[in-house]
Amino acid sequence: MKMPFDVISETPDEALLVLYANGDPLAARELAARYLPLVMGFATRMLSGDRAEAEDVAQEAMLRLWRIAPDWRQGEAKISTWLYRVVSNLCTDRLRGRTRRRAVGLDEAPDIADDVQGVEASLMDRDRMDALNEGLASLPERQRQAVVLRHIEGLSNPEIAQVMDIGVEAVESLTARGKRALATAMAGRRAELGYEEGT
């Protein structure tokens, strides 16, 4: 069954997955539009800003979603929760498999920002993002995962518990310890990053 684009954009996620499993390419496009940015952002943060590896992880996660579409059991898990868990596992595998840091190639060099905001503000924003990524990278893997899911991706503690396959209390503990460690790691950089006292 094929649906017009305006109807498909209002279709619930699970229904889109069923439509995709039945051969509807618009359903796949809509699901990708909804989830690829989330998957990519989460993978990038988990992999300490390595966009090339994050793209590989995001592509693999979406391929797994497409493969499981015909067998998806509705009502058991939200697609977003399932994807976060897959991305978490893929990132964990990559982090454990790293033996050395790759050199940054020309394709991975950051794009030059346009002049919408001033050069100084752009540099400060980039420095702040770099500092956040460095701070996150300094956390133990499970703490980083909990902090990113809670405070950057905006998941609730029960959703994080489902993604990480742990209890809600363990999520709360990991998040609290991760926030404290992140604050400690970034404490000496407040002035350098343009944060005044009390901000």
Image (cartoon, helix red, strand yellow):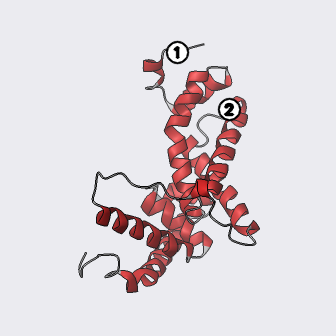
Residue depicted at 73% across the width and 62% down the height: 93
Image height of 188 relative to 16, above or below:
below
Tell me if residue 17 comes above or below residue 83 in the rendering: above
Viewer-nearest residue: 20 or 133: 133
Image position, residue 162 (x, y; %): 58, 55
Q: Is mark 2 on a helix, strand or loop?
A: helix
**Residue lying farthest to the bottom in this orientation:** 188
- Which one is in front in this view, the residue at disc 1 or the one at disc 2? 1
Q: Name the residue under label 1.
A: 3
**Amino acid on which the number 1 mark rests in the picture:** Met
Q: Is mark 1 on a helix, strand or loop?
A: loop
Distance from Cα at disc 1 to Cα at disc 2: 18 Å
Depicted 146 relative to depicted 196: above or below: above
Q: Residue at x 57, y 66 (%)?
A: 48
Q: Residue 130 location, x and y as percent?
A: 46, 69
Residue 131 position in % (x across, y down): 45, 73
Name the residue tied to disc 2.
69
In the displayed structure, does residue 140 sit left or right of residue 98? left
What is the three-letter code of the residue carrying label 2? Ala
